[in-house]
Amino acid sequence: MSSKLNFDFVSPMSSIFSGEVDGILIPAKEGDAEILPQHAPFMTALRVGVVEIKLTDSENLKFLIDGGFADIALDQVTLLAERSFDLVKSSKEDFDKIINDIAKDIEKSEDDREKEDLLIKKEILEANYS
Amino acid sequence: MANLKELRNRISSVSSTQKITKAMQMVAASKLRRAQENVETARPYSDKLGDILKNLSASFSGQDNAPELLAGNGNDKSHLLIIATSERGLCGGFNTSIVKLAKEHILQLKEEGKEVKLIIIGKKGKELLQRDFGQEIIDIYDFSEVKDLGFIEAEKVAENILSLFEEGKFDICSLYFAKFESVLSQVPVCQKLIPFDIESEVNEEKDIENICYEYEPDEEDILKELLPKNLSVQILRALLENVASEFGARLTAMDNATRNASDMIDDLTITYNRSRQASITSELIEIISGAEAL
């Protein structure tokens, strides 16, 4: 029994992460879920939130996603997301830019649900801003 | 025989044309590499999406409650054709071959008494189709200002298609673009978007593993979210393939043009040298015969 998961994180324009990981936290539609090795086959839609990739005990990667899909089949996990933002490696300027963009979108947005999503995104970004 | 000055002018004009075609060829070659990379990076996403959809749609086949995007709305009266072409010319038969395929299908559909609507992506397609089918064109996308075609553009087109579908403006939607096979061959293809074409999505490499999945939320809701996404991704893939094909076609066309130009220069140089020699000879004969007459 392997204690690692094969994880592919892809967006339409590039492959964001591909490799072996200890576990992944995903923001599933009906609540956050942690995927560990030997998880039962499971497919879920994702909402706006943070994907946390556990590389080792001390090393984590975090991405903000706009929603997407996760396909979990035993030790192979595939995550599809159209837009993602690296919360660990991005620079201050990147954060400023994306927060500004979102603030503008919030003003423009007329759809309540869309607005809610944008507000959640902004909160997550501000919480990770350091 | 043409006079020498004219020949000299023609040689210099052909060689400056050659310089241009050579430059375009090299630009196309370097852009082609990037475009090819883009196609390859987009592939995993659309393949994975295709796999997931295949798994899901298998459980819906033959059922009445399948979403309309998957199974169609049951009619086939009105067809929407999306024709993706390039923004720039000088790429050989690239645009004409796509348009030719589309035209054949349009005429065939019209003969069958179906209603045809067109959405055109790219300036060149508009130029080629506006005269014959100006009435049928409902929308034109011009991405000539966009440097790197990406997901945003594809999403724009997909959203438009979705809203048209929801309004019941068409029943069946297909997409025309050139598939990039190699630098030398780009094949115009027609891909069905709505209803979802399960057959073409089948990946022969691996069978569908019969894993009993758990779905959250249920299959129907996932499918409802996935299908519009799939539409954008398919369009994105078509756009990227098209870009790669365009550069491939331009590369070959410009290579041919450069070679033709150098053949032409060779021919012209020979003619030029011959006529120069002829005029020298005739001058010499004149001098000699003049001297002999004395």
Image (spheres, coloured by chain):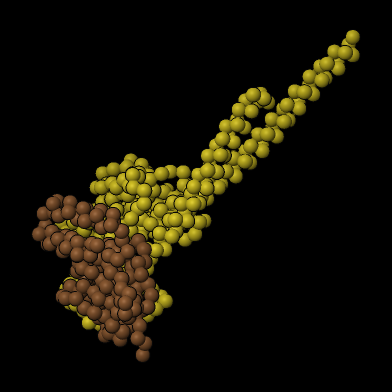
Chain colours: A brown, B yellow
Is residue B112 among the parts visible in the rendering?
no
Q: Residue furthest front?
A: A130
Q: Is residue A81 above or below residue B107?
A: below
Residue at x 17%, y 54% (from the top left corner): A103
Query: Residue B71 location, x and y as percent?
Result: 23, 69
Q: Nearer the viewer, residue A97 or B236?
A: A97
Residue at x 62%, y 41% (from the top left corner): B262
**B12 sits left or right of A116 in the view:** right
Query: Residue A12 location, x and y as percent?
Result: 33, 63
Q: Residue furthest top?
A: B294
Q: Is residue A79 above or below residue B249?
A: below
Q: Is residue A73 above or below residue A17?
A: below
**A85 sits left or right of A32 in the view:** right
Residue at x 21%, y 78% (from the top left corner): A33
Is residue B255 among the parts visible in the rendering?
yes
Q: Residue furthest bottom?
A: A1
Q: Is residue A7 above or below residue B46?
A: below
The C terminus of chain B: image quadrant: top right
Q: Nearer the viewer, residue B106 or B198?
A: B198
Q: How many marks?
A: 0
Query: Residue B230 location, x and y as percent?
Result: 28, 65
**B96 sits left or right of B7 in the view:** left
Residue at x 44%, y 58% (from the top left corner): B36
